[in-house]
Amino acid sequence: MSDTSADEGRVSESEIAVHWGEEGYVRPPASFVAQANLTDPSIRERMRLENFPDYFAECAELLTWDRRWDELLDTSHAPFFRWYVGGRLNASANCVDRHLATRRNQAALHFVPEPEDEPMQHVTFQELYVRVNELAAYLRDEVGVQAGDRVTIHMPMVPDLPIAMLACARLGAIHSVVFAGFSGKACADRMVDSESRVLITMDAYYRSGQLLDHKEKADVAVAEAQAGGQAVGRVLVFQRYPGRYESHAPLEEGRDVLMGPALKAYRGRRVEPVPMPAEAPLFLMYTSGSTGKPKGAQHGIGGYLAYAAWTTKTIQDLHPEDVYWCMADIGWITGHSYIVYGPLALGAATTLYEGTPTYPDAGRPWRIAEALGVNIFHTSPTAIRSLRKAGGGHPEHYGIHFKHMTTVGEPIEPDVWKWYHEVVGKGEAVIVDTWWQTETGGFLCSTVPALDPMKPGSTGPAVPGIHPVIFDEDGQEIPRGSGRAGNICIANPWPGMFQTIWKDPARFVATYFAKYNRDPDSHDWRDWPYMAGDGAMQAADGYYRILGRIDDVINVAGHRLGTKELESAALTVPDVAEAAVVAARDPIKGVVPEIFVALHPGREGGPDLERRVSEAIAKEISPIARPRRVWVVPDLPKTRSGKIMRRILTAIANNSPDVGDVTTLSNPEVVDAIRSQHAAP
Ligand code: WT7
């Protein structure tokens, strides 16, 4: 919070959050309980804080270790906690090799192309093993990738994406996957920060009926990385339609390699998985924070994989016999933990869908689920809202039967929850509303589906072993179950927790721990509660309700955007003198950004300028970051000391009748001007 406190009048997402009433309980069907993985009601008793950290051995027992750990948790560098110290393992061996004995011939990946006439592909564990090995051999012997090197992967939802991740993990290399929808520039920023000299990409992919050229983004990424001081010597290009489609972006001799032909020479090659220390990094996942620069959340191999596997088993209730589909993108943490690592570590098949859920119509997810026989379905409130708006695609017309459904990424309104439960789940499925973050590696709050009743609009109690506490601004604990809002923290470390921010340990401590730490020299974990950056309240029954971000982050459709990143993108338009991004409520996406810009003297506003601001944001960051509206205003409301009063802009963007006190402004007259502009159709 320290880097945002200067921003007077800041209004967070959690302050505009929808406050709905407490709902009644919905019980899980007996058929679900009868088959569930976790039905032992003593679990929370066993995993109470007094027993910390020993109970977290249970997560690690799900994995295969080359060497067992000596120490479960080392706190001597708190808050840089180290899990399963002395242990050695390989994530690729845990997700692939160890399943061959019993599941060689079973599906590991189901790939669903967006074009509906293109057949699905099913990759067995044996084929996954072969392809991961061949690519690992290529990376090691041709590109010189070694343990600890960073490899950036900018790929759409195709089998080669998890294969590339697992190939890196096999070598002990650290992957940094960048969401395919991010621009070449955003990819470059992440390559520069992580010092990646290798980029793995794809020539093209389908999105909403269009074959998008993706190779051109790689060219931008390499050029921009070069300009930022990072040389990228190799670009490995997978092809969506080898021999049938060629990207119009030419291949650069000596740098770009088409992987189809290149891998021919590696056919049949095998690479021994490198037994890595448990605390070595597995991957970086960049996420937005309060400053303009995305931060690389660093996750370690042993702790992360253990926690992803354990929560997939207990909260997702995944058995290897299930047909599981998480409709997220691997380019986000949800995809890392609950498309790739969690399911594959358990030897279950996972589904990759290339395209847009509502393409060509809202019935598409149900046709996919019906065709595959999906029984566990995992998605976000935004996807649920947009499917419902599009008429829902009539789930009742399809032979779909989910035993379990997940919602993740944003608060879900009870009304939307009930539609999901009754119409999509046909009243037969349990729902888990899982609250967590890029930094946390896995779920923090959720009902345990066979043990806890569901309550629409509440995420539920904490996951067993996780002990939340809500603090007020002054560091006082808000009484448990009081229904009063505060900053939610986790009292104890847990294995899935990120290890640090890549190359910025000071920011790790400052952002997540400093506010509620009482002794910076302490090596006791009790002195280091983790501050999540969300507002939350706990009802009398112990269930939590998450209100939204308390910092300068907007969570749009489950994608995290830093307001400062959007503002600096807007400032690349030369006419723009100042910009302020605020969170506005939206019926589909929950929350969306609106941007207010003031121009340099003599510059003209109008549709063209608005379009250029919006384009600049799409180009610098991604089309997903496009503001709902660009407002060109005469001036931004400021205090006498020159600070932008976002509180006023947030009120206007949310059509709130009361903008609050304007007497401290140096330019109170702009408030009415902006308000009438906003009210005009
Ligand atoms: C932020 C984290 C975790 C995977 C997707 C997003 C919000 C997440 C919920 C939920 C209410 C939620 C929080 C959190 N959030 N899940 N079930 N109910 N809010 O990961 O990009 O790191 O964003 O998403 O505000 O801090 P992320």
Image (cartoon, rainbow, N blue to C red):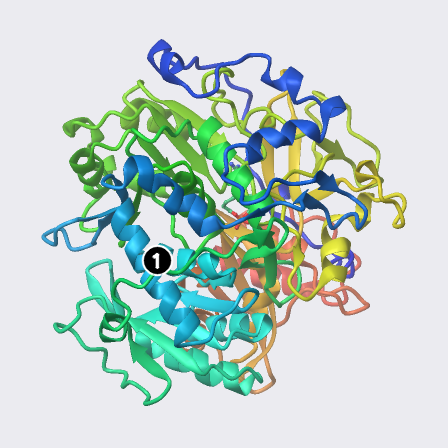
Specify whether tag 1 is near ligand 1 (CB below 8 Å).
no
Which residue is identified by label 1?
132
The quadrant of the picture showing ligand 1 is: top right
Q: Amino acid at mark 1?
A: Val
The quarter of the picture where the C terminus appears is bottom left
Q: Nearer the viewer, residue 504 or 126?
A: 126
Q: Is residue 674 above or below residue 543?
A: below
Q: Nearer the viewer, residue 557 or 66?
A: 66
Say which quarter of the image contains residue 155.
Answer: bottom left
Mark yes or no: residue 609 visible: yes
Q: Residue at x 76, y 48 (%)?
A: 79
State the residue lying farthest toward the bottom: 253
Q: Residue at x 55, y 20 (%)?
A: 22
Q: Is residue 288 above or below residue 372?
A: below
**Residue 498 placement (x, y as % from top left):** 63, 50
For the residue labelled by badge 1, is the local secondary structure a helix, a strand or a loop? helix
Q: Nearer the viewer, residue 24 or 314?
A: 314
**Residue 532 placement (x, y as % from top left):** 66, 44
